Image: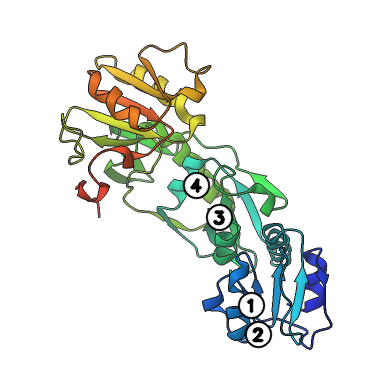
């Protein structure tokens, strides 16, 4: 990109009269800088190394010692905001279409094989830049506002209405589903039937945009993630015990998941462990326990008898055994 375009797009101020007029790439880590690159100094301590490695320009937002006057020094109010502006321009320039979805739809999309011009994305501004900067023109992006800052994008589109008849469920448990889609039987997918409507949303998007795709075997996503444990709360093989701790960090899904458990496991003892900060929520349910600190969660689990415990606001790393010690059944 040309220097004058960079300055205009970032609302920056060129503080010197440099020799260079354009840049090859935008880089954030000094060790990755090559000759001709523009370095965005999220970490100002890397500036000297970036220049040594061949940076032709530096974007910075903190007081900085101007050293090499032959390269461009661009002062901005905020590096992250400047990068967002550059990404937005890039997306417009490439004719990119951007669709917004919820967290479950996005995580399911990451497990589906699609055309290379359909890109599910998530992460911070730097991560998004790395994922999309060199993508093909006319690509289609899918993102979730709870996982990625919506301000990065312009002209965001909503998902089309879902076709609720796309999938035929044949067998199900609380955490597995066997279903038929387009005459193919997908047996014992690690996908709760709770999330089948979200999969239908995703498939409806593919069809409406004529995106070629292929379903693979699904593995558990981090939402409504079931971990089977023994009486010592050691993580065990999927489906091997009658005690399950379910984790959910997205509070927007909690009501739906509590209702699902209550409706589909009337026989079971269930407890719900909620952050104390949400003390005004979920009071209409029974067996609600609240915690102020994460270390209280295990004490609550140990003191109460249950078949299913839904734990909100944390992930399975709170359990005493590292997750690498849990051997789940492979579907691949």
Give the residue drawn at x 42%, y 13%.
285
Q: Provide the residue designation for mark 1.
A: 25
Residue 231, quarter of the rendered image: top left
Q: Which mark is residue 282?
A: none
* Residues at circles 4 and 1 in contact by the CB criterion of under 8 Å: no
**Sequence-first disc among 3 and 4:** 4
Q: Nearer the viewer, mark 4 or mark 1?
A: 1
The percent coordinates of residue 201 (x first, y second) are: 51, 40
* Residues at circles 1 and 2 in contact by the CB criterion of under 8 Å: yes
Q: CA distance from mark 4 to mark 1?
A: 29 Å
The percent coordinates of residue 286 (x first, y second) are: 38, 11
**Sequence-first disc among 1 and 3:** 1
Eyeballing the image, is 190 above or below 253?
below
Give the residue drawn at x 58%, y 62%.
126
The percent coordinates of residue 78 (x first, y second) are: 72, 58
Mark 4 Cα shell of 10 Å, populated few (<14), some (14-19), many (≥20)? many
Q: Nearer the viewer, mark 2 or mark 4?
A: 2
Residue 80, quarter of the rendered image: bottom right
Q: Secondary structure at mark 2?
A: loop
Of residue 159 and residue 131, the one placed in the foreground of this image is 131
Q: CA distance from mark 2 to mark 3?
A: 39 Å
């Amino acid at each position: 990109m040309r220097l004058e375009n960079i300055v205009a797009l970032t609302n920056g101020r060129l503080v010197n009269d440099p020799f260079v007029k354009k840049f090859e790439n935008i880089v954030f880590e000094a060790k990755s800088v090559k000759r001709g690159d523009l370095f965005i100094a999220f970490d100002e301590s890397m500036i000297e190394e970036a220049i040594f490695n061949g940076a032709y320009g530096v974007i910075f937002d903190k007081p900085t010692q101007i050293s090499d006057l032959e390269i461009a020094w661009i002062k901005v109010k905020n590096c992250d905001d400047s990068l967002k502006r550059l990404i937005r321009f890039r997306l417009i320039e490439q004719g990119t279409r951007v669709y917004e979805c919820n967290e479950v739809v996005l995580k399911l999309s990451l497990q589906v094989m699609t055309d290379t011009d359909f890109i599910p994305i998530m992460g911070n501004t730097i991560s998004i830049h790395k994922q999309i900067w060199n993508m093909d023109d006319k690509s289609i992006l899918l993102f979730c506002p709870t996982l990625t800052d919506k301000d990065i994008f312009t002209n965001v589109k909503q998902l089309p209405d879902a076709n609720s008849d796309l999938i035929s469920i044949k067998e199900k448990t609380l955490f597995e589903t066997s279903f038929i889609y387009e005459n193919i039987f997908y047996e014992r997918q690690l996908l709760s039937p709770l999330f089948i409507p979200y999969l239908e949303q995703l498939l409806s998007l593919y069809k409406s945009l004529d995106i070629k795709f292929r379903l693979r075997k699904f593995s558990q996503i981090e939402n409504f993630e079931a971990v089977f444990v023994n009486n010592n709360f050691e993580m065990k093989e999927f489906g091997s015990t009658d005690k399950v701790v379910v984790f959910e960090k997205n509070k927007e899904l909690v009501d739906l998941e509590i209702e699902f458990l209550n409706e589909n496991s009337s026989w079971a003892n269930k407890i719900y462990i909620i952050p104390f900060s949400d003390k005004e929520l979920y009071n209409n349910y029974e067996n609600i326990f609240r915690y102020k600190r994460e270390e209280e969660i295990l004490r609550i689990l140990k003191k109460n008898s249950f078949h299913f415990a839904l734990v909100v606001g944390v992930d399975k790393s709170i359990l005493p055994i590292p997750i690498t010690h849990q051997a789940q059944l492979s579907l691949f």
